[in-house]
Amino acid sequence: MAGYLDNYGAGEEQREKLIKRVVIVLVAVIVVGGVAFFFLKNYRQEKQVRTFFDLLEKKDYKAAYRLWGCTDEKPCRDYGFDRFMEDWGPNGAHSRPNGYRVTKSRSCGSGVILTVDMGDGQQEKLWVERNDLTIGFSPWPGCPPGR
């Protein structure tokens, strides 16, 4: 014969199991979210640099120059297309864009500093603005303190 108190506490055990599961799931979501944020926070800027090098590889220099926020109609004041070609064109200092690799990505104020291994021991630091994804040379070798 079943007694009055035979099932006493059964609901409490189920509630404890449910709470443990919820806590474990929340911790897992926070950890996975944190790892994803760490690795993907500069994804858009890194993708923009990959697009830039893809355009250079295709020899579409005008489109690559536009990623710097410059056009024929509105050239960059201190970085005209002729200077751009000296740096990135077929005879430029960085004329082999297919050997590039982004080795470091660091958030800094309103943008991201990307260290790009150009091959042959050359490195270039590029700046990508967060709001409009324009590319440029990094104004600093690293992020200055306080930024």
Image (cartoon, helix red, strand yellow):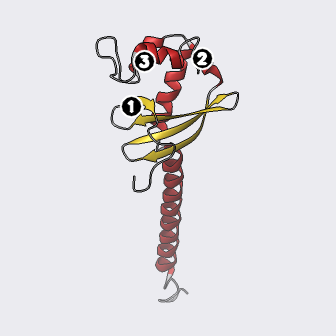
* Residue type (three-letter) at the residue carrying disc 2: Ser
Front-most of 113 and 80?
80
Instruction: Give residue 40's mark.
Output: none
Per the model, the C-alpha gap separating discs 1 and 2 is 23 Å
Question: Where residue 18 appears, x then y in whole percent?
Answer: 49, 69
> Disc count in the image?
3
The mark that comes first in sequence, 3 or 2, is 3
Question: Where residue 103 appears, x then y in whole percent?
Answer: 61, 38
Q: Is residue 52 left or right of residue 71?
A: right
* Residue ID at (48%, 62%): 26
* Residue type (three-letter) at the residue carrying disc 3: Tyr
Instruction: Give residue 65's mark.
Output: 3
* Residue type (three-letter) at the residue carrying disc 1: Leu
Residue wearing tag 2 = 95
Front-most of 126 and 28?
126
Per the model, the C-alpha gap separating discs 3 and 2 is 14 Å
Say which of marks 1 and 2 sits in front: 2
Say which of marks 3 and 1 sits in front: 3
Residue wearing tag 1 = 133
Question: Where residue 16 appears, x then y in whole percent?
Answer: 50, 75
Element on which disc 2 rests: loop
* Above or below for 106 versus 138: below
Q: Residue furthest right?
A: 120
Front-most of 3 and 31?
31
Element on which disc 1 rests: loop
* Residue ID at (50%, 73%): 14
Q: Are marks 3 and 1 in contact (CB under 8 Å)?
A: no
Q: Are marks 3 and 2 in contact (CB under 8 Å)?
A: no
Q: Is residue 97 left or right of residue 129?
A: right
The mark that comes first in sequence, 1 or 2, is 2
